[in-house]
Amino acid sequence: MNRKGFIGGSDAVKIMRGEWLDLWKIKTGRIEPENLDHILPVQIGILTEDLNLSWFEREENVLIINQQLQLEKDLDGVKIKGTIDGEVVRTTIKSLKDTSRYIIEAKHTNAFNNMKKVSEYYQAQMQLYMWLAEADNCYLSVIFGNLKWDWTKIPYDESYTATLLDMIKEFWGYIERDEEPDINRGEDYG
């Protein structure tokens, strides 16, 4: 997969976690991104995504539309791209007054993980996708192993997103200058 020329959701996670050097090497074509075709947890997550989304729809009485919607914006010359898992349309009468826009991200993780860790890890991706989709909230729907499903609502965080976008622009500067970032650059802002 070609990962050059833009910043995506998984890139945002790496930027906020301070994993700049390897990402810089990928974005400048010095190394190839890891082939995820034979990474079992990744493939399980791909295969369970439809189940995860349909389970959320049924359990929460909502409708998910625009699945796998590709979005793109320009951030001061940096192309930002993302593919949201879907947009949630609330179908209860009570929610008719709610004009907020909701997106959803579906994840599959091991049975020993917990929602706090999953939501912290994917915070940058979800905030970036909410920025791209101009959404107010993101539902994070998670299957833990094969016995538990849960979800949480993550609100759009303007302050966090401003920091994220600044970090993306700073990281992109290294790509434009073809300058290797300090291996210890960045902190874990996740």
Image: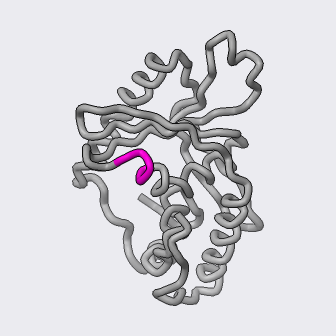
Nearer to us in this view, 1 or 73:
73
Report the predominant secondary structure element of the magenta stretch.
helix
Residue at 55% across, 19% down: 62
Side (left or right) of 7 relative to 34: right
Residue at 52% across, 15% down: 61
Nearer to us in this view, 112 or 134:
112
Residue at 64% across, 39% down: 137
Q: Which residues are magenta?
A: 114-118
Q: How is the image coloured?
A: one colour
In percent of width and height, residue 122 lies at 48, 53
Residue at the top extreme? 93
In percent of width and height, residue 178 lies at 58, 86
Nearer to us in this view, 186 or 178:
186
Side (left or right) of 35 relative to 6: left
Asked if the stretch drawn in magenta spans residue 85, the answer is no
Q: How many marks?
A: 0
Residue at 34% across, 42% down: 108
Nearer to us in this view, 137 or 33:
137
- Residue 111 drawn above or below residue 32: above
In percent of width and height, residue 175 lies at 59, 79
The N terminus: image quadrant? bottom left
Which picture quadrant has residue 71? top right
In percent of width and height, residue 3 lies at 48, 63
Which picture quadrant has residue 159? bottom right
